[in-house]
Image: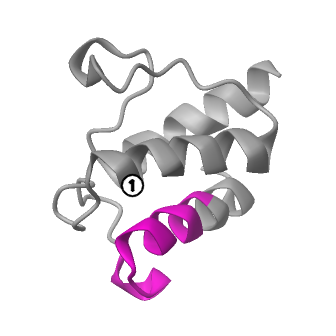
Amino acid sequence: MSDSVKTKVIAIIAEQAMLDITEVSLDASLDDLGVDSLGLVEAVFAIEEEFDVQVPFNANETENADFDISTVKSMIAAVEKLVAEA
């Protein structure tokens, strides 16, 4: 797990959850952190902008997305994969 990607993704999630980055656990889901659907969409946009990638995500079909949002750790792994492919 790249520390740079990890740090940036956690910062994006923390901003959407209105939490300090120290309060964002890798095993937490976005629901656990209080991120609603609008916050999720804003986080995805922020990730795309920060890393210059296109996230394969459909907010209406989160269960079938190619971008795993089940935990913070899975989101970091998905972003790392997108960055490596870019």
Residue sitting nearer the eye, 31 or 83 = 31
Q: Is residue 76 visible?
A: no
| Membership of 21 in magenta stretch | yes
Q: Is residue 23 visible?
A: yes
Q: Answer above or below: position of 53 versus 38.
A: above
Three-letter code for the amino acid on which mark 1 is drawn: Gly
Q: Mark 1 points at which residue?
A: 39
Where disc 1 sits, the SS reads helix
Residue at the (46%, 63%) spot, across then down: 13
Magenta highlight range: 9-24
Q: Answer above or below: position of 63 versus 25.
A: above
- Quadrant of the rendered image containing residue 27: bottom left
| Residue 78 placement, left or right of 58 | right
Residue at the (36%, 71%) spot, across then down: 17
Residue 26 rendering spot, x and y as whole percentages? 35, 61
Residue sitting nearer the eye, 85 or 39 = 39
Our reading of the magenta stretch's main secondary structure is: helix
- Quadrant of the rendered image containing residue 80: top right
Residue at the (59%, 26%) spot, across then down: 55
Residue 20 rendering spot, x and y as whole percentages? 44, 88
Residue 44 rendering spot, x and y as whole percentages? 53, 41
| Membership of 79 in magenta stretch | no
